[in-house]
């Protein structure tokens, strides 16, 4: 079930300094302390009022019912540290205030019978009510903020329209759905003869059985796919490989990464005319347009003359490399033009047309480049891979991209 919610992004909420040094592996068990949330609640969710409301509602449930595992098992929603528990739930989108029953904390019990303490439907209901209590308090903060905004004198409004951006959030798939689009096609084809009936029944004809067995056997480690039993059995123990064990293990690992990435919420923005086309795939960019002196990096180049309505070439050029198995590093965005000065504001980074609010380093940009001062920003952006280096394509959009008349 894909559920689509239209929301207005409060732009300020997206402004996160996600610099190179602060980045941690987003899938590691150690949650990053950074806030990145989208939607109207984003600001409110980083207040101490939200933490206190969480402590009196959801945290009570997780501390009594989930503590056996989730004080250390990611997501640590039952952590001893209430702030950490709160942040992980927010940052990993485990609650959805716009549609509370679809929250992972609820669905996990209701749809996947995950560690219910009595009747799953009742337990899910109890969690839902706890989330409602929390949401109510957070929504009050949002309303108060909006009232304050409305009583502002409104000066400076009208020119940029920065708060009018409509965006569509597609919630991440459930674990079950994501599994069916990633690991299941492999296990169903390759592990069939035995694991139809033998536990874990990951090749069972019923995908729900296959999924639940894998989860309860802990055969996958979504935080560290390499460490999954499904990978280890192939890579280290040569258990029923179908061709080369290392290749098979790698295929399984990539499928598990895809499982994980399909569960993350994604934002599709209305990319208007102020946007670039998609680049070549990351791997072709690196191989066909390498950065001199750095064999690992390539230039992504985008022609902007159409967007700017000029006849001579103006190019956006950005460096990219593969940072690790989960992410790309993007840096040195610059505009190359022999004659024009160009105002650049709010440059958003898209992968395969999707905007992830985590990738917001350049959304805070507001600068003017000149033929000799080309740089847009000196920050590094770490961007999560989507489909992998052979598929992923970048593009960028701008709130303002215009020629500055001299
Ligand atoms: C016996 C150990 C255990 C207990 C108790 C437990 N969990 Fe989990 N939980 C796990 C493991 C292992 C994972 C990682 C694998 C997975 O996603 O199922 C996990 C993952 C999760 C996830 C993240 C993955 C997703 O599907 O979104 C959520 C949410 C979750 N648990 C909710 C809960 C809730 C709510 C409770 C308490 C009612 C709870 N868990 C109790 C072991 C446990
Ligand atoms: C010819 C039969 C057979 C096939 C095919 C087979 N397995 Fe197994 N598998 C077994 C047996 C028997 C066990 C239990 C004994 C053991 O652990 O080796 C098992 C156990 C497992 C376990 C659970 C124990 C653990 O180490 O975590 C995993 C995971 C597993 N297999 C993965 C796979 C994968 C992945 C495939 C498909 C690529 C596969 N198996 C194909 C026979 C098979």
Image (cartoon, rainbow, N blue to C red):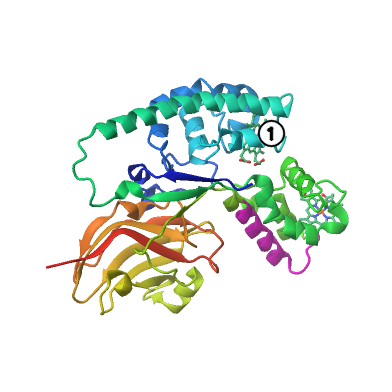
The verdict on residue 254 being magenta is yes
Residue 197 percent across, percent down from the top left: 88, 49
Residue 333's place in the image compared with 2, above or below, is below
Q: Position of residue 369 (x, y in %)?
A: 21, 65
The residue lying toward the viewer, choosing from 113 and 288, is 113
> Could you tell me residue 285's position as x and y percent?
45, 73
Q: Main secondary structure of the magenta part?
A: helix
Q: Quadrant of residue 101?
A: top right
Was residue 267 drawn as part of the magenta stretch in this picture? Answer: no
Numbered disc 1: secondary structure: helix
Q: Residue at x 66, y 36 (%)?
A: 108
Residue 170: where, in percent of width, then height?
53, 49
Q: Which residues are magenta?
A: 239-259
Q: Nearer the viewer, residue 112 or 201?
A: 112
Q: Is residue 179 above or below residue 396?
A: above
Can residue 384 be seen?
A: yes
Q: Is mark 1 within 8 Å of ligand 1?
A: no
* Residue 85 higher or lower than 64, as above or below: below
**Whether residue 225 is situated above or below residue 243 in the rendered picture:** above
The number of discs equals: 1
Where in the image, quadrant-wise, is ligand 1 located?
A: top right
Circle 1 is placed at which residue position? 110
Q: Residue at x 56, y 24 (%)?
A: 130
């Amino acid at each position: 079930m894909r559920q689509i919610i239209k929301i207005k992004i409060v732009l300020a909420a997206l402004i996160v300094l996600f610099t190179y040094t602060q980045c941690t592996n987003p899938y590691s068990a150690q949650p990053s302390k950074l806030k990145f949330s989208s939607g109207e609640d984003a600001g409110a969710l980083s207040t101490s009022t939200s933490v206190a409301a969480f402590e009196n509602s959801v945290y009570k449930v997780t501390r009594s019912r989930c503590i056996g595992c989730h004080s250390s098992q990611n997501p640590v929603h039952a952590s001893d540290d209430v702030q950490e528990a709160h942040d992980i739930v927010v940052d990993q989108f485990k609650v959805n205030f716009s549609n509370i029953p679809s929250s992972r904390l609820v669905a996990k019990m209701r749809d996947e019978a995950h560690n219910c303490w009595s009747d799953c439907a009742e337990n899910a209901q109890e969690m839902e009510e706890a989330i409602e209590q929390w949401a109510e308090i957070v929504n009050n903060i949002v309303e108060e903020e909006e009232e304050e905004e409305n009583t502002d004198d409104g000066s400076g409004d009208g020119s940029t329209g920065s708060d009018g951006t409509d965006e569509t959030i597609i919630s991440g798939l459930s674990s079950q759905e994501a599994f069916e689009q990633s690991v299941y096609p492999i296990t169903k084809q390759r592990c069939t003869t035995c694991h139809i009936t033998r536990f874990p029944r990951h090749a069972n004809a019923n995908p729900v059985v296959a999924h639940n067995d894998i989860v309860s056997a802990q055969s996958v480690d979504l935080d560290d796919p390499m460490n999954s039993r499904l990978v280890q059995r192939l890579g280290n123990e040569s258990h029923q490989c179908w061709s080369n064990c290392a290749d098979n293990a790698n295929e399984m690992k990539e499928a598990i990464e895809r499982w994980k990435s399909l569960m993350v919420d994604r934002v599709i923005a209305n990319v208007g005319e102020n946007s670039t086309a998609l680049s070549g795939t990351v791997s072709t960019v690196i191989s066909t347009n390498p950065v001199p002196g750095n064999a690992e990096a390539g230039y992504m180049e985008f022609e902007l003359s159409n967007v700017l309505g000029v006849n001579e070439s103006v190019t956006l050029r950005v460096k990219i490399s593969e940072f690790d198995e989960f992410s790309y590093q993007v840096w040195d965005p610059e505009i190359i033009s022999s004659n024009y000065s160009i105002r650049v504001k709010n440059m958003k980074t898209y992968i395969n047309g999707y905007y992830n609010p985590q990738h917001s380093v350049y959304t805070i940009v507001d600068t003017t480049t000149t033929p000799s001062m080309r740089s847009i920003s000196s920050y590094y952006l770490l961007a999560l891979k989507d489909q992998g280096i052979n598929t992923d394509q970048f593009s960028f959009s701008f709130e303002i991209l215009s020629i500055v008349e001299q």
